[in-house]
Image (cartoon, rainbow, N blue to C red):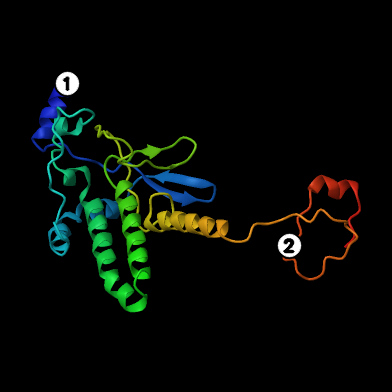
Amino acid sequence: MTMEDIRVEGQAGRLSTINTAVIVDGQSGKEYRLPTKHEVMMAEGAEKEIPSLFEEIPFGLPEEPLPSKEALGFRVPLYGFDQWRKLFTSRQLLSIGTFVGQTRTVFDYLTETYQEGWNQAIYSYLAVNTDKLIDRSSTQCIWISTNAEKPSGSFGRFALHITWDYVEVMPWSESAGGFRATFNTYLSIFNMRYGVSSERPYALRSSATKPMGEAFDIVVTDPPIMTQFRIPT
């Protein structure tokens, strides 16, 4: 079979996928095993739930056309991927639709619970986090097995190439690509930003025998000095 034959099959909608491995957390890192029949069946059963789910979401399924095959860097139309929705598996669309729908319902709760400004900020952060989940939930995501075992992103550049193998991330996973893991990343950024606005630390550089009182939470010393001099306690 030539590459042209594969493209013809793709444009006719006859390309399919097969689950080859499941990645789980083990005692010494990631472990790889064969998928079970139940896992394969659950993936295949997602399609029937998609129409009703996206009826509740403005604009519905992302069925807008992709750039044509003549567009620079866009190779997926050659294989039948001519709509944005075709970049996602049924299970990925089900996951994305669920998170988008639930994020939208949170706004009313935020309006009732938080004052104006806070509700908009929290809602925006949740929306951005959902965007990041989508970036890690498409058939463009390959598995990075070198240095760090994690999924790649989808839209890091202005190009969409055909991928012959991809990874599906469990959306509520605490590993890279999951909703919670991404949210924790944003929280760490907020915490760092908050720390910048606090009072800056300062060094006393005074005698070690001088009493310091009770105003200190922590005392930091240079480890080599600890081995050379006796520090009074």
- Disc 1 marks which amino acid? Thr
Query: Toward the viewer: 119 or 60?
Result: 119
Q: Residue furthest left?
A: 12
Screen quadrant of the N terminus? top left
Picture residue at 46% right of the left edge, 54% below the top: 185
Query: Toward the viewer: 227 or 139?
Result: 227
- Disc 2 marks which amino acid? Ile
Question: In the rendered view, would you say 90 is above or below 125?
Answer: above
Category of crowding for the residue at label 2, using alpha-carbon neighbours closer than 10 angstroms: few (below 14), some (14–19), many (at least 20):
few
Q: Quadrant of residue 182?
A: bottom left
Query: Toward the viewer: 150 or 133?
Result: 133
Picture residue at 13% right of the left edge, 32% below the top: 68
Category of crowding for the residue at label 1, using alpha-carbon neighbours closer than 10 angstroms: few (below 14), some (14–19), many (at least 20):
few
Which residue, given by chain and number where applicable, does mark 1 sit on? Answer: 2
Which residue, given by chain and number where applicable, does mark 2 sit on? Answer: 218
Residue 105 coordinates in the image, percent (x, y): 25, 69
Question: In the rendered view, would you say 27 is above or below 125?
Answer: above
In contact (CB < 8 Å): disc 1 and disc 2? no
Residue 15 coordinates in the image, percent (x, y): 16, 36
Q: Secondary structure at mark 2?
A: loop
Marked residue nearer the N-terminal end (1 or 2): 1
